[in-house]
Image (cartoon, coloured by chain):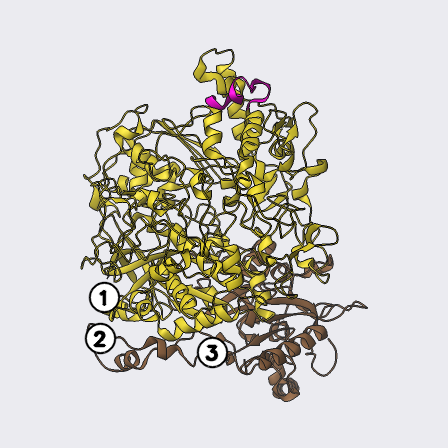
Chain colours: A yellow, B brown
C-alpha cells in the first residue's frame, strides 16, 4: 500500500502512531514491509492455504466471535445432503463435469432451498447476478442448527473443508514458518471481538490469480468468523489498481454489467423481455425485490420518452451478450480476425496486459484502432516499434490496422468525479483548459454519440431503435463545447420524469416509468439539487463519531460509509461495545441511529420476525444485517454465486514449480480458463526448465505500464530502467551480478532487466525444498523516454473462472545472466496463425475452442 | 546571523520580526515515496539528472544532492550478508550452495532493527555554513529566516562552495556552470506558503516551521520512540551539546535510527573557515605582515640603489 497508494498510506501511518499493528504478507519485502510491524514472506499464489490455515486455527481453537457467527452468518444453515466437499472428492466439489470443465451447482444448495433454474451450461464470467446474491433462491424454508453441531451445517462443513490446513501444511505449501503463522493468528484473534476489530487490505496480489475471487472469499470467511464485517475498523478493503476504477465498475465499463451492478441481459436465455429479466434478476426476498424499480428507471434515463410500458421501456433494444466478451476473450477473437475495430481509452494493452506479445499480434488484425491517451503509448505504435516488428514477424507495410491517436485531457484539465475504493465519490473542478486538441473522455463520447445519432437519424430499422431513441441532450458549455458534467450527474442521480425534480435517493424510484435514474446506487449524489460529491467538510474529529466525516464528499449508497453496519450492533440492537459503537437501535425514537447512515430499514426493530410467506424486505428479520442476500446472512458458504466452489480451496497457480500438496490429482483450479492454443503455451507443473516463481509488482515512482510516468523525466529518472529483484543465493547460482544484466525466460518470451540482488527477496522452504521467487516490476515498454522490456511479455493468458482476470501474480520462469539474445517474443514467431478463423459478425460460440481441464 | 559564530564573509538580510525557520525530517515515518524529490523539482523547475540504473543504490537512482536535485531520497538496505555468503566473499572462488542447502536468511535478519532505511536528504542550512563562508561573490546569503540561499544570478561558477560543504550538498551544474541548492523555498515563504517538499510529504516526515518549535517537537518524538523500545532513535544536527554541534547546529535537522554514516552523513562536521578561524586569521595576518615587510624591504633596497 505504501508503494501504490502512498497518500492513502498516510492514514495507515497515523493508525500506527496511535498503536495499530500493521502486518504485511507479501512474497517481497516492499516499502510497506519496512513500515509494518511484522512482515511474512509467502510463496506467491498460496494465499488460500495461508488464510485457510488461519480459518482452521480459529475454528479448532473456537476463537470465532460466536454470537456474531450464529446470528449474522449462515454458519448454522444446513446444506443439502448431496453436497460433496473437496475433502471427499480429492479436490473437486460435487457436480463437476470433466467434459465442460464446469460445475452443475445444484448439489451445493441449502437443504430446502431451490436454485433459480439454470438450464444448460453457463459460459464463463457471465455469471447470472441473481446467483451472486442468492436472489434466485426461491421457496422453502432454510433449515438451521443454532448449536452449530449438525454434521451438515455450514460451520461443520467449513471445519471439514479446512481440516488439513494445519500450520504444518501452511509451512509446507506457503513456506511460512509456524512461528510467523502463530504470531499472525494470535494478533488477529486478540484484535477481534466486541472490543476490537481488524481490517484486511488487499490489492491485485490477491485478485490476479486463477483463484483470485476465492482468495478474497477466504478473507471474507475469516472476517465473518472473527466478527469484523460491518464494524468500524473492520472489513476488507480492496485497493484498486487505477484511479476511479471503482467508478468504472459502478457505472460500468465491464461488458457483463449495467450501471449499478444490474446484469447485462443474455441472448438465448430467459431474458428476452423485461418481465422475464425482472423475474430472473429480482428476488422475492431481500433488497433485490426492488430490482424492477432500478431497471425501469435506468431504461427511462437512456431512452426518455421513447421508453414506455408498451415497449417494455426499450428493454429489448439493449444489446445482449452471447458469451464471454471480457478483455482476453476479445483478444483471442481479435487474433482470430473476428474484431474489426477497437477503442482503447486510457489503457495500454500492448504492454499493460498479460501476454503482451499476443495482445500486440491481435491488434495487428484489426481494421482500425482508436487510442486516446496523454502520450504516444505502445498501443499506438505497436505497428512500428514492437518486438514483433523488430524480429520481422510483423512488417509495418503489411499491417492493415489504421491507428487514430487522439489526445486526451489530463486529470486537472477536466472536471468530474473520482470514485475511491471505499465508494467515496469526490468531485473535482478543472484547473485549466486542455491544450490544443486534447479533450476529456466525456467530450469525446458525447460528440461521438452525437455524430453517430446524426448518422442514424430517421432510420426505421428495428436494430437502429436504440441509437435513434437514445436520450442525448446534455448542455454544452464554453468554447470547446464541453458537455455539462453536472447534467450527467443529475441524470445519474435520478429525477421525476414529469417534473424534473431530482430524487433524494433510490427509495424514491418507481417501476412504473415515472422516474428515471442512470445508476441507482449513485442516487442521492445530487440530492436537494446540491452536488454532494463536491462537499469537503471533514467535520470535527474530536466529536463522538466525528471520524466518519459524512460531509466529506459522498459515498454510495445513500452516503453510507460502512456497509452492513447493522452488524455493528448485537441482535438486540445494542453496540457490541462502547468502544466500537457505530450504529444502534434507539428504542425511544423507534429508529436506528448512530454515526453513519444505518444500513437497515430505518424503522425495523431488532425483534421483528418475518412470517414464513413474507416477501421483499418484509422477509428480512430485525437481526439479519446482510439484507442484500436472500437469507439476510453473511455467507461463509456460498450456495450460489461462484463458478468454482461454495468454499475456497487451495489450488496451485496454473504454472507452479510444485504439485498441489493437498490435492495432487487436481493441481490448479479445474474451472480456470486456460485458452489452450499454440500461441498460448503453458508450463507444466514442476517443469524443470522453469523452476522459479515469478511475481509482478509496482513501484511508487511509476504508474501501470509507464504511459504517464516514463514520459515525464522527473519520474523517469527515479526508476530509469527495468530491473528485477532476485535473492543472493539464486543470483550466485546463476552468475547474476548486482547491477548487471539478467534475462527472464518463459515459453512466451524472454526479457532483460538490471539485476537488483537483495536480501529482501528470499528463497522459501516449500515442502522441504528451496523455491526461489523473482520480483518483476511491470512499468516498462518500448515507448517513452525511459524504455525497457515489458514484464507482461512473459505471462500466458489464463483467467479466473468467475471474472476472467489474468494470473499475473504467480507464474514460472527461469533466469540467466546477461542480456537477451534477440527480440523478446521471437520464440513465438511463426506460431501465431495468420489466417482468420472467425468473421466479425460470426457468433462467438462457434469460435470458442474446447477447454482442457486439470493440470 | 550575528555573534561569535558569524564568519566575516557572511552576507545576511536583516528584516525585523522574522524567525529562524527550518526542517525537521523524521525518517521514522518516511515511506520512501520520493514525493519530496519530485515536488522540489517541479516547483523549482529543475532538470532531471540522468537515466541510468545505479548499482548499489537500492531504489535510489538519482544518487546525490546536486545542482539539479535539491531533495534526495536515500535508500539503504541494511541486511548484512549471512555468514556463509560472507565467507564466500573472502575466499577466492565463490562456492555455490549445494542444492537444498539454504543459508538461514530468516535467522540472519533477526536482531536487525529496520531492514531498509529511507531518508530524505536536503541542504542542512547550517548555523556555520561552509558554503556561505567560502563564497567570494556574495551569491550565497543568509536570509531573514536564517536559511542559506544561493542566488543563481550572482553566482559566477567558481565552485568554492562545493568543497566547503561538509555534507556534499551544493554542487555546480555541469552544463550551466553555476551552483545550486535548496533554498528552503524562499519564494514560497515570501507568500506564507510552506516549502514544496513539506507540503507534498504524505506522512509528514518532512515538517516545516519555526526552528525552536521544531526542535521541541523533535525531542518529544525521540522520547516517544524510546518509550516504544526504539532506543536507536536520536536527533542529528539539533539539541546537541555545544562541543558536539554539527556546523553550529543544523537548520534542517533529522531524526535517525542508525549511525549517521549509514545514511551517508558525517559524524562530525564544521564549516572549514570556522574550524580554522584562528589559524586562517593568523596565516592571513602573517601573510599580510610578510607582504608589507617585503614591500618595505623592496622600497628600502630600491632607495639604496637609487642613491
The percent position of residue A106, horizontal first and vertical second, equals: 34, 42
Q: Main secondary structure of the magenta part?
A: helix
Q: For residue B97, which numbered disc appears in the image?
A: 2
Quadrant of the image occupied by residue A661: bottom left
Q: Which of labels 2 and 1 is toward the front?
A: 2
Left or right of B83? Residue A487 is right
Residue at the spot of label 1: A734
Residues at discs 1 and 3 in contact (Cβ within 8 Å)? no
Chain letter of disc 2 in the image: B
Earlier along the polypeptide chain: callout 2 or callout 3? 2
Q: Which residues are magenta?
A: A303-317
Inspect the magenta stretch and tell me whether residue B254 lies in it: no
Quadrant of the image occupied by residue A512: top right
Chain letter of disc 1 in the image: A
Residue at the spot of label 3: B113
CA separation in Å, label 1 and label 3: 31 Å
The percent position of residue A832, horizontal first and vertical second, equals: 22, 37
The percent position of residue A101, horizontal first and vertical second, equals: 26, 43
Left or right of A283? Residue A155 is left
User: Which residue is nearer to you in this view: B58 or B164?
Assistant: B58
Amino acid at each position: 500500500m505504501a508503494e501504490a497508494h502512498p497518500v492513502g498510506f498516510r492514514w495507515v501511518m497515523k493508525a500506527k502512531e496511535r498503536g495499530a499493528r500493521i502486518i504485511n504478507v507479501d512474497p517481497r519485502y516492499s516499502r510497506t514491509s519496512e513500515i509494518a510491524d511484522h512482515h511474512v514472506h509467502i510463496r506467491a499464489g498460496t494465499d488460500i492455504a495461508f488464510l485457510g490455515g488461519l480459518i482452521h486455527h480459529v475454528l479448532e481453537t473456537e476463537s470465532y466471535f460466536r454470537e456474531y457467527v450464529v446470528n449474522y452468518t449462515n454458519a448454522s444453515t444446513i446444506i443439502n445432503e448431496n453436497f460433496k466437499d473437496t475433502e471427499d472428492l480429492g479436490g473437486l466439489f460435487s457436480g463437476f463435469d470433466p467434459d465442460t470443465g464446469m460445475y452443475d451447482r445444484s448439489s451445493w444448495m441449502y437443504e430446502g432451498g431451490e436454485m433459480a433454474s439454470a438450464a444448460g451450461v453457463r459460459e464463463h464470467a457471465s455469471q447470472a447476478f441473481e446467483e451472486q446474491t442468492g436472489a434466485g433462491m426461491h421457496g422453502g424454508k432454510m433449515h438451521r442448527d443454532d448449536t452449530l453441531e449438525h454434521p451438515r451445517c455450514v460451520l461443520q462443513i467449513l471445519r471439514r473443508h479446512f481440516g488439513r490446513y494445519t500450520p504444518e501444511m501452511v509451512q509446507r505449501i506457503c513456506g511460512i514458518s509456524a512461528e510467523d503463522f502463530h504470531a499472525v493468528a494470535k494478533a488477529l484473534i486478540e484484535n477481534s471481538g466486541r472490543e476490537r476489530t481488524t481490517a484486511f487490505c488487499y490489492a491485485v496480489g490477491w485478485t490476479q490469480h486463477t483463484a483470485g475471487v476465492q482468495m478474497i472469499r477466504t478473507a471474507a470467511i475469516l472476517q465473518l468468523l472473527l466478527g469484523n464485517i460491518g464494524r468500524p475498523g473492520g472489513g476488507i478493503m480492496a485497493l484498486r489498481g487505477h484511479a476511479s476504477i471503482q467508478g468504472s465498475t459502478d457505472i460500468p465499463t465491464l461488458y457483463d454489467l449495467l450501471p449499478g451492478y444490474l446484469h447485462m441481459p443474455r441472448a438465448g436465455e430467459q431474458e428476452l423481455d423485461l418481465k422475464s429479466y425482472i423475474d430472473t434478476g429480482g428476488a422475492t426476498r431481500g433488497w433485490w425485490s426492488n430490482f424492477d424499480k432500478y431497471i425501469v428507471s435506468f431504461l427511462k434515463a437512456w431512452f426518455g420518452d421513447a421508453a414506455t410500458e408498451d415497449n417494455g421501456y426499450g428493454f429489448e433494444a439493449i444489446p445482449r451478450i452471447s458469451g464471454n466478451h471480457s478483455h482476453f476473450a476479445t483478444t483471442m477473437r481479435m487474433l482470430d480476425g473476428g474484431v474489426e475495430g477497437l477503442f482503447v481509452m486510457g489503457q495500454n494493452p500492448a504492454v499493460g496486459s498479460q501476454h503482451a506479445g499476443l495482445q500486440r499480434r491481435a491488434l495487428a488484425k484489426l481494421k482500425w484502432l482508436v487510442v486516446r491517451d496523454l502520450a504516444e503509448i505502445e498501443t499506438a505504435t505497436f505497428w512500428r516499434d514492437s518486438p514483433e516488428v523488430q524480429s520481422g514477424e510483423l512488417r509495418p507495410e503489411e499491417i492493415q490496422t489504421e491507428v487514430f491517436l487522439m489526445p486526451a485531457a489530463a486529470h486537472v484539465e477536466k472536471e468530474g468525479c473520482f470514485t475511491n475504493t471505499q465508494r467515496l465519490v469526490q468531485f473535482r473542478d478543472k484547473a485549466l483548459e486542455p491544450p490544443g486538441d486534447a479533450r476529456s473522455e466525456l467530450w469525446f463520447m458525447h460528440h461521438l454519440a452525437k455524430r453517430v445519432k446524426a448518422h442514424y437519424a430517421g432510420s426505421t430499422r428495428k436494430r437502429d431503435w436504440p441509437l435513434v431513441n437514445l436520450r442525448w441532450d446534455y448542455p454544452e458549455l464554453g468554447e470547446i463545447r464541453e458537455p455539462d458534467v453536472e447534467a450527467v450527474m443529475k441524470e445519474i442521480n435520478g429525477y421525476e420524469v414529469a417534473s424534473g425534480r431530482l430524487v433524494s435517493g433510490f427509495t424514491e424510484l418507481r417501476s412504473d416509468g415515472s422516474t428515471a435514474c442512470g445508476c441507482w446506487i449513485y442516487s442521492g449524489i445530487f440530492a436537494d439539487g446540491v452536488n454532494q460529491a463536491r462537499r469537503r467538510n471533514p467535520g470535527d474529529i474530536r466529536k463522538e463519531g466525528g471520524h466518519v466525516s459524512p460531509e466529506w464528499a459522498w459515498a454510495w449508497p445513500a452516503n453510507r460509509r460502512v456497509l452492513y453496519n447493522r452488524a455493528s450492533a448485537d441482535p438486540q440492537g445494542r453496540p457490541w461495545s462502547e468502544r466500537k459503537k457505530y450504529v444502534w437501535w434507539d428504542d425511544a425514537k423507534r429508529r436506528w441511529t448512530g454515526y453513519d447512515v444505518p444500513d437497515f430499514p430505518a424503522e425495523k426493530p431488532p425483534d421483528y420476525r418475518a412470517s414464513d410467506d413474507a416477501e421483499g424486505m418484509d422477509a428480512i428479520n430485525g437481526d439479519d444485517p446482510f439484507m442484500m442476500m436472500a437469507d439476510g446472512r453473511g455467507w461463509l458458504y456460498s450456495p450460489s454465486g461462484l463458478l468454482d466452489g461454495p468454499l475456497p480451496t487451495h489450488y496451485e497457480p496454473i504454472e507452479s514449480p510444485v504439485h498441489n500438496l493437498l490435492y495432487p490429482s487436481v493441481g490448479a483450479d479445474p474451472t480456470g480458463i486456460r485458452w489452450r492454443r499454440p500461441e498460448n503455451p503453458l508450463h507444466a507443473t514442476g517443469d524443470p526448465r522453469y523452476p522459479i516463481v515469478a511475481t509482478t509488482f509496482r513501484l511508487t515512482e511509476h504508474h501501470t505500464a509507464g504511459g504517464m510516468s516514463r514520459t515525464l523525466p522527473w519520474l523517469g529518472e527515479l526508476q530509469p530502467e527495468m530491473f528485477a529483484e532476485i535473492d543472493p543465493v539464486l543470483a550466485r547460482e546463476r552468475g547474476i551480478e548486482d547491477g548487471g544484466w539478467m534475462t527472464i525466460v518463459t515459453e512466451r518470451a524472454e526479457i532483460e532487466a538490471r539485476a537488483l540482488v537483495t536480501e529482501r527477496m528470499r528463497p522459501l522452504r516449500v515442502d522441504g525444498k528451496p523455491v526461489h521467487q523473482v520480483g518483476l516490476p511491470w512499468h516498462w515498454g518500448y515507448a517513452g523516454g525511459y524504455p525497457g522490456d515489458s514484464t507482461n511479455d512473459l505471462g500466458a493468458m489464463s483467467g479466473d473462472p468467475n471474472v476472467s482476470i489474468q494470473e499475473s501474480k504467480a507464474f514460472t520462469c527461469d533466469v540467466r545472466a546477461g542480456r537477451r539474445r534477440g527480440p523478446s517474443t521471437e520464440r513465438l514467431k511463426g506460431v501465431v496463425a495468420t489466417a482468420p478463423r472467425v468473421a466479425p459478425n460470426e457468433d462467438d460460440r462457434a469460435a470458442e475452442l474446447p477447454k482442457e481441464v486439470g493440470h | 546571523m550575528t555573534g561569535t559564530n558569524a564568519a566575516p564573509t557572511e552576507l545576511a538580510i536583516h528584516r525585523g520580526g522574522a524567525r529562524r525557520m527550518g526542517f525537521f525530517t523524521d525518517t521514522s515515518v518516511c515511506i520512501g515515496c520520493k514525493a519530496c524529490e519530485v515536488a522540489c523539482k517541479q516547483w523549482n523547475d529543475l532538470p532531471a539528472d540522468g537515466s541510468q540504473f545505479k548499482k548499489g543504490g537500492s531504489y535510489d537512482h538519482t544518487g546525490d544532492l546536486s545542482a539539479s536535485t535539491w531533495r534526495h531520497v536515500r535508500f539503504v538496505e541494511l541486511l548484512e550478508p549471512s555468514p556463509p555468503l560472507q565467507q564466500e566473499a573472502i575466499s577466492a572462488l565463490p562456492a555455490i550452495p549445494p542444492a537444498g542447502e539454504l543459508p538461514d536468511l530468516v535467522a540472519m535478519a533477526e536482531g536487525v532493527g529496520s531492514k531498509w532505511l529511507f531518508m530524505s536528504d536536503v541542504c542542512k542550512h547550517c548555523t556555520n555554513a561552509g558554503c556561505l563562508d567560502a563564497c567570494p561573490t556574495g551569491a550565497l546569503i543568509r536570509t531573514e529566516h536564517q536559511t542559506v540561499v544561493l542566488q543563481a544570478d550572482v553566482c559566477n561558477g567558481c565552485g568554492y562552495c562545493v568543497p566547503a560543504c561538509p555534507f556534499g550538498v551544493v554542487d555546480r551544474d555541469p552544463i550551466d556552470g553555476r551552483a545550486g541548492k535548496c533554498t528552503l523555498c524562499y519564494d514560497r515563504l515570501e507568500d506564507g506558503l510552506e516549502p514544496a517538499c513539506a507540503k507534498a510529504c504524505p506522512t509528514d516526515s518532512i515538517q516545516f516551521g519555526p526552528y525552536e518549535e521544531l526542535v521541541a517537537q523533535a525531542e518529544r518524538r525521540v522520547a516517544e520512540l524510546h518509550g516504544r523500545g526504539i532506543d536507536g532513535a536520536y536527533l542529528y544536527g539539533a539539541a546537541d551539546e555545544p562541543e558536539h554541534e554539527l556546523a553550529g547546529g543544523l537548520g534542517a535537522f533529522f531524526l535517525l535510527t542508525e549511525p549517521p554514516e549509514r545514511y551517508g552523513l558525517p559524524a562530525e562536521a564544521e564549516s572549514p573557515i570556522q574550524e580554522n578561524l584562528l589559524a586562517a586569521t593568523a596565516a592571513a595576518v602573517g601573510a599580510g605582515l610578510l607582504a608589507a615587510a617585503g614591500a618595505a624591504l623592496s622600497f628600502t633596497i630600491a632607495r639604496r640603489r637609487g642613491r
